Amino acid sequence: MFLDYDTLKLIWWLLVGVLLIGFALTDGFDLGVGMLLPFLGKNDNERRVIINSVGPTWEGNQVWLITAGGAIFAAWPTVYATAFSGLYVALLLVVFALFFRPVGFDYRSKIADPRWRNSWDWALFVGGFVPALVFGITFGNLLQGVPFHFDEILRSTYTGSFFDLLNPFALLAGLVSLSMLVMHGAIYLQLRTEEAVYQRAKRAAAIAALTMITSFALAGLWLGMGIDGFRILSMPPVDAAPNILAKTVEQASGAWLSNYASYPWMLMAPLFGFSGAAGALWLSARDQPGLAFISSGLSLTGVILTAGFSMFPFILPSSTDPNSSLTAWDATSSHLTLSWMFFAAIFFLPLIILYTSWVYRIMGGKVTEKQIQQKKHSVY
Amino acid sequence: MVSETVVELSRFQFALTAMYHFLFVPLTLGLAWLLVIMESVYVITGKQIYKDMTRFWGKLFGINFALGVTTGITLEFQFGTNWAYFSHYVGDIFGVPLAIEGMMAFFLESTFVGLFFFGWDRLTKAQHLVVTFLVALGSNLSALWILIANGWMQNPVGAEFNIETMRMELTSFADLFFNPVAQVKFVHTVAAGYVTGAMFVLAISSYYLLKGRDEAFARRSFAIASAFGLASILSVIILGDESGYELGDVQKAKLAAIEAEWETHEAPAPFTLFGIPNQETQTTDYAIKIPFLLGLIATRSIDEEVEGLKDIIARNEGRIRNGMLAYGALHKLRGGDNSEQTRTLFEQHKKDLGYGLLLKRYTEAVTDASDAQIAEAARNSIPHVAPIFWVFRLMVAAGFIMLFVFAAAFYYCTKRVACHKPWLLKLALFSLPLPWIAIEGGWFVAEYGRQPWVIGGILPTRLATSTLEASDLYFSLAGFIGFYTLLLVIELFLMFKYARLGPSSLHTKRYHFETTGNDTATVLATQPQARE
């Protein structure tokens, strides 16, 4: 086979990261726009401007999430199995909330009744708010470890409850996630709208960016001082067949910071998280939404990588049976599967980025109230 | 061990959400190509009416598409949330087509579908047609990869058990991709989708013709749907699924169940047209049989046997005993006993490991199963015959009625008199539910007929669930039933509203409800359009 097993395991950690970041960068602003919709649009026309700024493209963006799910299934089957079944109620809430988006976008404009339209606006709000919050809470819990273990046939049992997920640190992580996606969405709206909606989006971007910087800093401090990380004591060779129960793991304070000590370049991630958001704040206030959007994107990338780097190689640490923790070395699929999936990914991901960019170019430009009025029967 | 309740509720939830998803997907598959055809005619002839057709049927396509996407999200997550052991045990293989589906197909479809609706003024005619084509291509490629995944559940080829990782692993991507069961399934399923799209357009066009409105618009839609529908229904029937039933042990049991074939007959076997299958006595009461037909359909020959259920059960009993040995050896191997003897024993019987796992239902340890338990496991190694027998016949009946409808519609279209045959138009209108009855029936036969396996011969369904509590399932089921009912009501409401409005919903001022007197579209249709 073309690439070594250990190389592929590392590549797949990166590729899952790429897919999650791709989701945050693209569908992230759709979620943010959904959350802002009822607040930034004061009348039906303004709300239609907001909806149509993402209407033609949100659907493709959501596929980053679907594909990330599929890729986790194929590349890390045990992570997919353990995390999705363990976080059952939380994930179903995400699924239920996501229901509202396809129908919200498509059905809202089909009937003119204000009650109908107002209901869908709030449905779109929920469709943005719940997933953004739950994803943040999930990362907050991953960093603390979640309670699960395996039996001898590798069936996982999760022993926590949904309400255990709602602990203070996780809620803080939820706030990081919410505020960064609202920031991203608000700046996107600045890019695509004008006048009243633009001005309100600018204010929202400032509030969200400040919230994000504060909560991210607090979460970082908390992580460094108050949360025990995980550390591998012994494990089989990295290129061995994945055998989850063959390693020993301990929980230790400060363990999540050890990667930054070993690889100082990883500090770029939190640095981008902060400076990207600060840059976005500054550029947005100076009416440079294009640059602000790029800066906000860098911030999102930095935040997600910060979570990833802190935990690496852990993906899903177990708080009740640390040896059952899942890592990028032992939760992967076979060498052959990783190889095939790698070829598929390096072929299709550039292609996807290429045609997505083309679609954005075609559908680009400001969405105005006049346009909506002219085409009120064909736009969302 | 997971309770029976959790297993049953998980199965119910998967069936509910998959079959609900499948209400929308086939219409997307078929309608997408009909849009490509209509728009191609528009690009070639430049006649405005074909653009209006593309846009109007596209509007209905959009209402349906939204729910297809909505309900697809559920399925993507549900393997992990509810079938965690399945995901661990076969994710190495099953995850591959799912992930590639996302990258190759769903991205394509979803990225361009927005441009289909909003790109009319921003693209040239040819560019827009390419966009429509890519949406159709994406949705069909999507079906291909999903059915490769599903085909592997019926006939798991190209994979092997790995003792160290305690799961199935991929050994050949080519075998997975070219799995004959998957290929046959793909053709049969997408063709059924085309039939659904065609019947949808045919029935709604018939409604306009019966009402005497938007005639030029409806007549052209009717004609395209009848031709496309006839070709599709012929593909569905001729390229039926049967040829896939000779491959794989689970497929054989499914075939025997469809035909309520308890005994193995001398070739060629007769086809049981009707009868009442009795699982207890393993007989079919009051059977009406047509000589030779089953052998011909199932084996495409006159000298191959179609294996009966009793023989399948007897063979499975032997395989269960082998599976016990394999499971016992595996247990020792994983416990650290690496002796040559244990390894050989496992290698010898590992192909029957899945059959050993069937015993987990009766005894956790497997190796201590009694003869009575083994016999019961063997008896339950085939699906319940009666529901499969009946639902299959329902599907086939719906198929043949549709064949008649499309053939008549096509015939009278070529004679140019279809619009003046009220009986035909009424028949077409009332045939609207038939494709859904047939596809849901087909789905049921394929998946219920796979029981007790989730992966044929490899992993029993009741082992495959997540370790959940019944209360988790009640929560999720309540959510699904509540939201899905609400969404269905809203979808049908909009669908009926827009189907009744017809092309007037485009607000072009050319159609019924907007014009007085003459059907101006008739005039327009005959003139090439001036640049808009």
Image (cartoon, coloured by chain):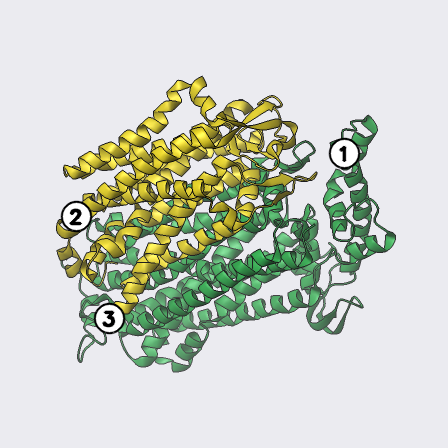
Chain of the residue under the numbered disc 3 shown in the image: B
Separation of residues labelled 2 and 1 (CA atoms):
68 Å
Chain of the residue under the numbered disc 2 shown in the image: A
User: Mark 2 — residue?
Assistant: A198
Residue drawn at (25%, 63%), measured in percent from left and top? Answer: B52
Label 3 CA crowd tier, 10 Å (few <14, some 14–19, many 20+): many
Q: Secondary structure at mark 1?
A: helix
Is residue B300 depicted above or below A1 in this figure?
below
Task: State if disc 3 and disc 1 touch (CB < 8 Å).
Answer: no
Task: State if disc 2 and disc 3 touch (CB < 8 Å).
Answer: no
Tell me the number on the disc at residue B347.
1
Separation of residues labelled 1 and 3 (CA atoms):
69 Å
- Amino acid at the residue labelled 1: Glu
Label 2 CA crowd tier, 10 Å (few <14, some 14–19, many 20+): many
Q: Quadrant of residue B298?
A: bottom right
Taking the image as drawn, is residue A285 in sight?
A: yes
- Amino acid at the residue labelled 2: Tyr
User: Mark 3 — residue?
Assistant: B504
Residue drawn at (36%, 59%), measured in percent from left and top? Answer: A103
Instruction: Please identify, in this view, whether the residue under mark 3 or under mark 2 is nearer the observer.
Output: 2
**In this view of the protein, which residue sits in the foreground, B371 or A95?**
A95
Tell me the number on the disc at residue A42.
none
> Do circles 2 and 1 both sit on a common chain?
no
